[in-house]
Image (tube, rainbow, N blue to C red):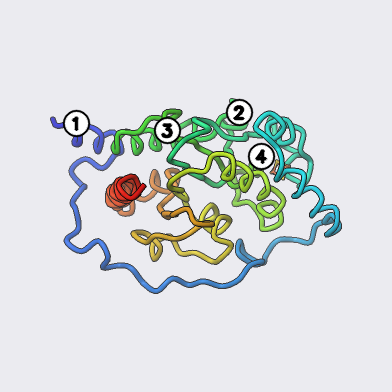
Amino acid sequence: MSRRDSILREMGLGAQWKLRDNPAADEAPLAVSPAPSFLGDSAPPRPTPTLAAAEGRGAAIATMEWDALRAAVAGCDACMLCQERKQAVLGVGDVNADWLFVGEGPGAEEDERGEPFVGQAGKLLDAMLAAIDLRRGEDVYIANAVKCRPPGNRTPEAEEAAACWPYLERQIELIRPKLIVALGKPAAQTLLQAEVKVGASRGRLFDYKGIPLIVTYHPAYLLRSLADKAKAWEDLCFMRRTMRELKEKA
Ligand code: SF4
């Protein structure tokens, strides 16, 4: 069995994997609408800090180096997600990485262990990384849109994602990756501050403050959706090709 076949098998693609003749065939025009309703408008009203306080907090986070950022996240109570977490999960990996992968938020195992993408979704992410010759921690940094576990693994609410955003924004500034990969809709919407449909956004290059950004499915979603799992390989090939081109241009 070839290395690619064994990695695809590990990803659960096995015999189902088949490269589409026309990867762009399902690309539809991207629906983009302005924030703030980017994560839905069904969130119940919550007490929010004053604008001045939020701006002050954001400005302070924007100057933090890694140690201060880690301490700030560990003690953060800026949104309701602090109430049920065991620990906040800042991220893991090479702080000088070319690759930044951003997921949604910690799950139960991540909350327990303090590291993003452990458990089944983490194993699949590791297999996806291996498929393009990457390893967790080596030129790769992995973070989430929110740093504390949403109860019941629900999608973070708009206010929670907004409260946590300064941390991810600062992480990106400190890492300055060559390429950002948004894993799933909440991560994509948080980074792009717009409504995003993952299926329609795959295979496209977005821009985050001058850094190319690619949208693909979240590994936890891929575990449940065999049909979309087959598309992950195309996205990985697109990522690898994009990185190669970025390095050639540099
Ligand atoms: S999710 Fe983010 S903003 Fe909310 S308490 Fe945790 S670290 Fe703070």
Instruction: Pick whichever of labels 4 and 3 is earlier in the sequence.
Output: 3
Q: Amino acid at mark 4?
A: Cys
Q: CA distance from mark 3 to mark 2?
A: 20 Å
Q: CA distance from mark 4 to mark 3?
A: 24 Å
Q: Amino acid at mark 3?
A: Asp
Residue at horizontal 68%, vertical 28%?
67
Does residue 246 appear in the picture of this structure?
yes
Q: Is residue 95 above or below residue 230?
A: above
Q: Which mark is residue 114?
A: 2
Q: Amino acid at mark 1?
A: Arg
Q: Does the residue tagged 4 have its C-beta within 8 Å of any atom of ligand 1?
A: yes
Q: CA distance from mark 2 to mark 4?
A: 10 Å
- Name the quadrant containing residue 65: top right
Left or right? Give the position of 248 relative to 46. left
Front one among 147 and 86: 147
Residue that numbered label 1 is attached to = 3
Q: Is residue 75 above or below residue 19?
A: above
Q: CA distance from mark 4 to mark 1?
A: 36 Å
- Name the quadrant containing residue 108: top right
| Element on which disc 3 rests | loop
Instruction: Pick whichever of labels 2 and 4 is earlier in the sequence.
Output: 2
Q: Which mark is residue 148?
A: 4
Instruction: Dividing the image into four quarters, tell me where ligand 1 lies.
Output: top right
| Element on which disc 4 rests | loop
Left or right? Give the position of 53 relative to 205. right
